[in-house]
Amino acid sequence: MNPTLSAVVPAAADPATLPTPKVKVSPATALEIYTGDPNFMASLARGLVVIQAFTPQTPQMTISQLSVRTGLSRAAVRRCLYTLVKLGFAGSDETQRYSLRPKMLTLANTYTASSTLANAAQPILERMSSLLHESFSVATLDGDDIVYIARTSVTRVMSVDLHIGSRLPAFCTSMGRVLLAYLPQDQLELYLSRATFTQFTPRTITSADKLRLALRNVRRNGYALVDQELEIGLRSLAVPVQAPNGRVVATVNLSGHAPRMPMLEMQTRFLSHLRGAAAELSVFLR
């Protein structure tokens, strides 16, 4: 992935007219908004912050590394890990590098088993994959990311392996564009005000104004087609899944390799199948 390109500021530019850079807030700092709330369980929140710090890129970390990543003190991280280890959700090796344990899957399985949408989506996606021999997914919006709640894969379409629970940035993915396009205006503006537009490829949209235009096109067309903005060679198409009240709660998508999947073919061959799957899923939201 390409690093975000740095903007070159002319020497004569008035500092007052320059955009204020977005400061990355640590997970621990983000919890400070709940200070003083007597019903907020800070210790549980800190434990969840530690859990979410583990990623496929960093599956093992020391207490010091977790402290830096989360913004929590080393003492707080140590107490969280002690509890997680005692309950079987985490463990450490001989070098005191901690990692999550398989018991953590019980939490994800609890969500999947209790989610009507996730349960309904999986067989629908599997049927489409069997018929069309392509990879399909269903996702919802969680903060600034999309989260996969159902997926079938016939080929690996990205450099990273996607699975249920995987997260990707919303602004440069077809499923994210669909979910953002149908947000209430005030929620969309809030998202745009805090979003960090990382330039993953030369094609990535990296400004709020350009994203607004793209989202208007999504609403007009009823689908999002994203061409190699997250990763070169990856092309994807997504449609909304609507609840009976008209609110878009999820999205269905097709993803594939750009060289073998022309954009016109994606629209003419696959769009009707995606819309049919979305209509099926909408029934389960009644």
Image: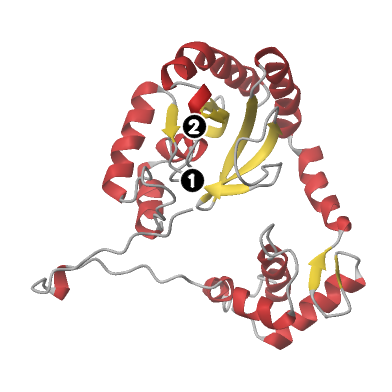
The reply, left or right, for residue 7 in relation to residue 84 is left
Q: CA distance from mark 1 to mark 2?
A: 15 Å
Looking at the picture, the colour scheme in use is secondary structure
**Residue that carries the numbered disc 2 in the rendered image:** 235
Residue 70: image location, x then y, percent:
62, 74
**In this view of the protein, which residue sits in the foreground, 154 or 209?**
154
Question: In the rendered structure, which amino acid carries the disc numbered 2?
Answer: Arg
**In this view of the protein, which residue sits in the foreground, 259 or 219?**
259
Residue 93: image location, x then y, percent:
87, 74
* Occupied quadrant, residue 113: top right
Whether label 1 touches label 2, CB < 8 Å? no
Q: Is residue 20 visible?
A: yes
Label ID, residue 126? none
Residue pushed farthest front? 259
Task: Name the residue rendered at 88%, 72% in the picture.
Answer: 85
* Occupied quadrant, residue 41: bottom right
**In this view of the protein, which residue sits in the foreground, 171 or 283?**
171
Residue pushed farthest left? 12
Looking at the image, residue 92 lies above or below residue 126: below
Q: Earlier in the sequence, mark 1 or mark 2?
A: 1
**Residue that carries the numbered disc 1 in the rendered image:** 170
Q: Residues within 10 Å of mark 1 (few under 14, many from 20)?
A: many
Task: Name the residue rendered at 91%, 66% in the picture.
Answer: 88
Task: Name the residue rendered at 82%, 80% in the picture.
Answer: 96
Residue 147: image location, x then y, percent:
61, 45
Task: Name the residue rendered at 74%, 37% in the picture.
Answer: 115
Q: Residues within 10 Å of mark 2 (few under 14, many from 20)?
A: many
Q: Nearer the viewer, mark 1 or mark 2?
A: 2
Residue 177: image location, x then y, percent:
44, 38
